[in-house]
Amino acid sequence: EGSAKSAYEDGWKAWMDGDLQGAKSGFNKAASADPKSPAPHYALGIVNERLSDRPGALNEFRTSFTVKPDYEQGMCAYALSLLRAGNKGEADSFLTDKHAKLPESARIATCYAELKSQQNDSATAQQLAQGALKIDPDF
């Protein structure tokens, strides 16, 4: 939809200008104008993290893959946000589940490899990363 695209572009421009509140406003308008689009929610999650609003970020990332269940960017951002918040077990459980449900996803495998690396499980991280490269050598 035109108004959603315009609002998203306004949010993106504000982000690029370092205007986090303007970015948040633009992405919120885009999310309202096109509630089925995951991108504005993902972008809001990123902005909320930058604003140190972890609960708000987690909520927006979760919304991104709720409105579009295969939205892997949102899933990955959600898991890594959980990890940064110190919720390692929850992040691990979440990615274990998503990796089992989406075994052909290079993005989820790469994200899971990052989580394992952060948990100092280098062997599993390497195995997951190699698996991601087999799925998509260009990823």
Image (spheres, rainbow, N blue to C red):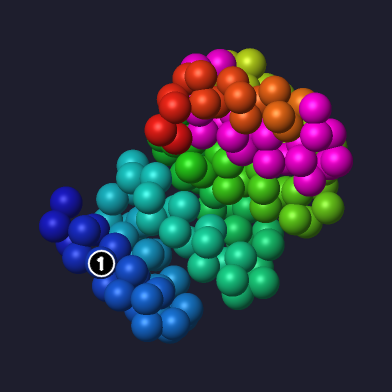
Q: Residue at x 66, y 25 (%)?
A: 128
Q: Residue at x 83, y 53 (%)?
A: 86
Residue 21 vs residue 7: left or right?
Answer: right
Q: Position of residue 98 (x, y in %)?
A: 61, 25
| 124 vs 25, nearest the viewer | 124
Q: Amino acid at mark 1?
A: Glu
| Residue 18 found in image quarter | bottom left
Q: Is residue 88 above or below residue 47?
A: above
Asked if residue 11 shows in the view, the reply is: yes
Q: Position of residue 11 (x, y in %)?
A: 34, 70
On whether residue 139 falls in the magenta region, the answer is no
Marks counted in the figure total 1
Magenta-tinted stretch: 103-123
* Secondary structure of the residue carrying numbered label 1: helix
Q: Residue at x 44, y 59 (%)?
A: 43
Q: Which residue is mark 1?
A: 9
Q: Position of residue 125 (x, y in %)?
A: 73, 32
Residue 71 vs residue 82: left or right?
Answer: left
Q: Residue at x 80, y 34 (%)?
A: 122
Q: Is residue 104 above or below residue 93?
A: above
Q: Main secondary structure of the magenta part?
A: helix
On whether residue 116 falls in the magenta region, the answer is yes
Residue 50 vs residue 118: left or right?
Answer: left
Asked if residue 66 shows in the view, the reply is: no
Q: Is residue 67 above or below residue 85?
A: above
